Image (spheres, rainbow, N blue to C red):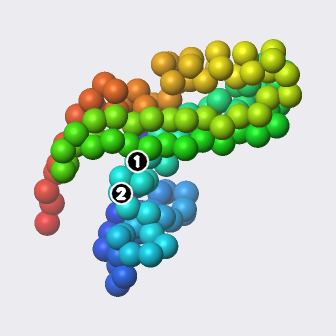
């Protein structure tokens, strides 16, 4: 089970995990919005899984980065999320391995992407 505590602060909101990490959120300068955090989660889940799996197959990529964008279907609903890799591979073989791994990670391993595609239920519990 994953756990994050989110609370209002004097100048926005903060999310903390049980390992002590924090992310500040808000709409002001220098803050991530919740939607941007969702896109970061999709990107992070994919790239943090692709990199070691590609390396395990004997190919260290020269550059591995990505852009993650979203399109809205309406004011409160996303139509799509697009992950665009920016990769420099040392060889054609390394590129082929990367492409195979990246596709497999998206289809089978990234819990964030798979949950979005599946439409995971979100439950609200009101305490207090």
How far across and down, in percent of the image, does residue 65 sit?
A: 66, 42
Q: Is residue 28 left or right of residue 89?
A: left
Q: In this view, does 125 lie to the left or right of 69?
A: left
**In percent of the image, x 65 and y 29: which residue is there?**
50
How far across and down, in percent of the image, does residue 40 sit?
A: 49, 48
Camera-side residue: 59 or 110?
Answer: 59
Residue under label 2, please give it. 34
**In percent of the image, x 28 and y 32: which residue is there?**
120
Residue 61 in which image quadrant: top right
How far across and down, in percent of the image, does residue 115 sit?
A: 36, 30
Residue 78 in which image quadrant: top left
Q: In this view, does 94 lie above or below 17?
A: above
Q: Is residue 123 above or below residue 128?
A: above
Camera-side residue: 67 or 113?
Answer: 67
Residue under label 1, please give it. 38
Camera-side residue: 65 or 3?
Answer: 65
How far across and down, in percent of the image, does residue 85 sit?
A: 61, 35
Question: What quarter of the picture does the C terminus occupy?
Answer: bottom left
């Amino acid at each position: 089970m994953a756990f994050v505590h989110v609370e209002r602060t004097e100048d926005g909101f903060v999310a903390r995990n049980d390992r002590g990490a924090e992310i500040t959120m808000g709409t002001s300068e220098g803050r991530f919005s919740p939607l941007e955090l969702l896109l970061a989660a999709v990107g992070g889940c994919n790239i943090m899984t692709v990199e070691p799996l590609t390396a395990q197959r004997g190919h260290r990529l020269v550059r591995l980065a990505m852009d993650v964008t979203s399109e809205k279907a309406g004011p409160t609903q996303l139509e799509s999320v697009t992950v665009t890799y920016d990769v420099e591979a040392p060889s054609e073989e390394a590129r082929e391995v990367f492409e195979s791994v990246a596709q497999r990670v998206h289809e089978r391993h990234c819990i964030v992407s798979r949950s979005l595609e599946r439409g995971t239920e979100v439950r609200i519990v009101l305490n207090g």
